[in-house]
Amino acid sequence: MSIQENCTVRENQALGSNIFALTIAAPRITALAQPGQFVHITCGEANLLRRPISICQAHDGLLKIIFVVKGEGTRWLSQRCAGDVLDIVGPAGHGFDMTRLGHRPVFIGGGIGVPPMLQTMQAAKAGGAEPTAILGFRNMDAVILEDDFKAVGNTYVTTDDGSYGIHGFVSDVFKQHISEYTAVCCCGPKPMLRALAAIAEEAGIPCQVSMEERMGCGIGACLVCVCSLKSKDGDTRYGHVCKDGPVFDAKEVQW
């Protein structure tokens, strides 16, 4: 269930080039938030459509979101200061099924797909699991939240150019350690998710993917975030990332 709440910004922190973390007082939304869900934020009067942003953390009445400035809406959001009030709808969408993880799940994020994996990994740890994280970035300057993940469990960091951590892709590390994991949850660019889903299917372990798509209404009324899914009879059906996702079983997705 989503609700609308006027929420006060507590802190705005710049994490890197065009990457910002907002901590927001949102007691009603955080009380309902589940790992993998997102919020829809009004970004100024000049921007009619709300901006969907994944929940990084939600606890003690505080909501943390991390986003990259990509356009006018997120640029406006990046300029908010402590005390500013935001119109937020959430939590929205379907998150990760935490009952399917087993004892040794791995949480994989690529780029801006990293933040939502933190709350999910923390929830798994709180449930008694021994989680691992694999985080992928373009380069050293793009690395975020490494210490936060390491505080929860074993964490690998990869960079495309080898400037930090392991030189390569998250799929390389996942495949190398696949026998250690009981399930995988991942969020990031579609090519990354496709590769991880194929590795998981070959290994016979459950894989849940959080799809990144542009959204319009955020409630399933428009067609902006439509994605192709498999029906039970093998034909193609269509779903909305905002309403039916953003998390899907990887076997449902028409890659």
Image (tube, rainbow, N blue to C red):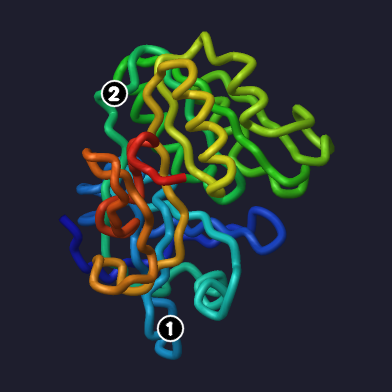
Secondary structure at numbered mark 2: helix
Q: Quadrant of residue 53?
A: bottom left
In the shown orientation, is residue 30 left or right of residue 176? left
Measuring 82% from the left and 40% from the top, which residue is drawn there?
161
Residue 194 position within the rendered picture, expressed as x and y whole percent measured from the top left: 52, 39
Q: Visible in this render: residue 91?
A: no
Instruction: Look at the image and tell me in which quarter the N terminus lies.
Output: bottom left
> What residue is disc 2 on?
100
Q: Quadrant of residue 71?
A: bottom right
Residue 70, compared with residue 72, is above or below; it is above
Instruction: First in sequence, mark 2 or 1: give its number.
Output: 1
Vertical comparison of 42 with 82: above or below? below
Mark 1 residue type: Gly
Name the amino acid type tagged 2: Arg
Corner quadrant of residue 221 = bottom left
Q: Secondary structure at mark 1?
A: loop
Query: Distance of mark 2 from mark 1, alpha carbons?
Result: 39 Å
Please identify, in this view, whether the residue under mark 2 or under mark 1 is nearer the observer: 2
Q: Are marks 2 and 1 in contact (CB under 8 Å)?
A: no
- For disc 1, the neighbor class at 10 Å (few under 14, some 14 to 19, many from 20) is some
Foreground residue, 238 or 140?
238
Tell me where residue 165 appears, x and y as whole percent: 76, 29
Q: Nearer the viewer, residue 213 or 24?
A: 213
Assess disc 2: are there few (<14), some (14-19) or many (≥20) residues with their C-alpha within 10 Å of its C-alpha.
some
Q: Is residue 183 visible?
A: yes
Q: Who's the residue at 29% across and 20% down the image?
A: 127
Task: Give the residue number, with chain letter if any, for mark 1.
Answer: 44
**Residue under the point 64% across and 16% down:** 176
Vertical comparison of 73 with 125: above or below? below
**Depth order, front residue of 15/160:** 160
User: Residue 62's spot in the image, x, y percent?
Assistant: 35, 51
